[in-house]
Amino acid sequence: MSIIKRGGTIKEVKNLGWLTSNWHQVSDFSAIRGSGAHPNAYLVAHLRDGGSYETNWASFSHMLSWLQRPIFVGLLITVFSQDGKRHSAVIGDAGYTIWMKAPQTVWK
């Protein structure tokens, strides 16, 4: 399930289509990465109006791959791991590419 949070209200949206259609509203991303046998992720797109788009991902690596769309290149993503580590990278930059190629090495 994907949701939009704005001003104390929560609205359910069908899927990632909302995010790709409304990409111009996104200022940056944050994500919480699962751990161990659960390599999932929870993605939050922070919107310019103070709201957020939020959705679950079954795979952290698929989420990173999906975010490589040209509409998101140049935006910052900050990822928080379950053990409290925090990593930031700009989508499309070298640091992000390292995440794409070997995310397990970044998250030891």
Image (cartoon, rainbow, N blue to C red):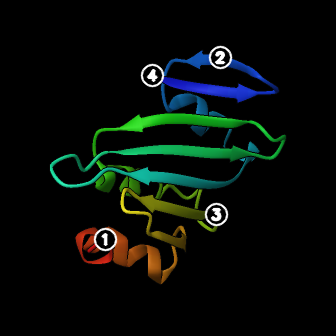
Residue found 31% across the figure and 71% down from its top: 107
Above or below — where is 20 with respect to 87?
above
Q: Nearer the viewer, mark 4 or mark 3?
A: 4
**3D distance between C-alphas at marks 4 and 3:** 23 Å
Left or right: where 82 falls relative to 24: left
Identified by mark 2, the residue type is Lys
**3D distance between C-alphas at marks 2 and 1:** 33 Å
Q: Nearer the viewer, mark 3 or mark 1?
A: 1
The x, y position of residue 52, in whole percent, is: 68, 37
Q: Are marks 3 and 1 in contact (CB under 8 Å)?
A: no
**3D distance between C-alphas at marks 2 and 4:** 10 Å
Above or below — where is 61 with respect to 38?
below
Residue 11's tag is 2
Identified by mark 4, the residue type is Met
- Residue in front for this viewpoint, 68 or 78: 78
Residue 107's tag is 1
Residue 75's tag is 3
Left or right: where 34 falls relative to 53: left
- Residue in front for this viewpoint, 36 or 4: 36
The x, y position of residue 85, in whole percent, is: 44, 69
- Residue in front for this viewpoint, 47 or 41: 41
Q: Can residue 71 be seen here?
A: no
Residue found 59% across the figure and 29% down from its top: 18
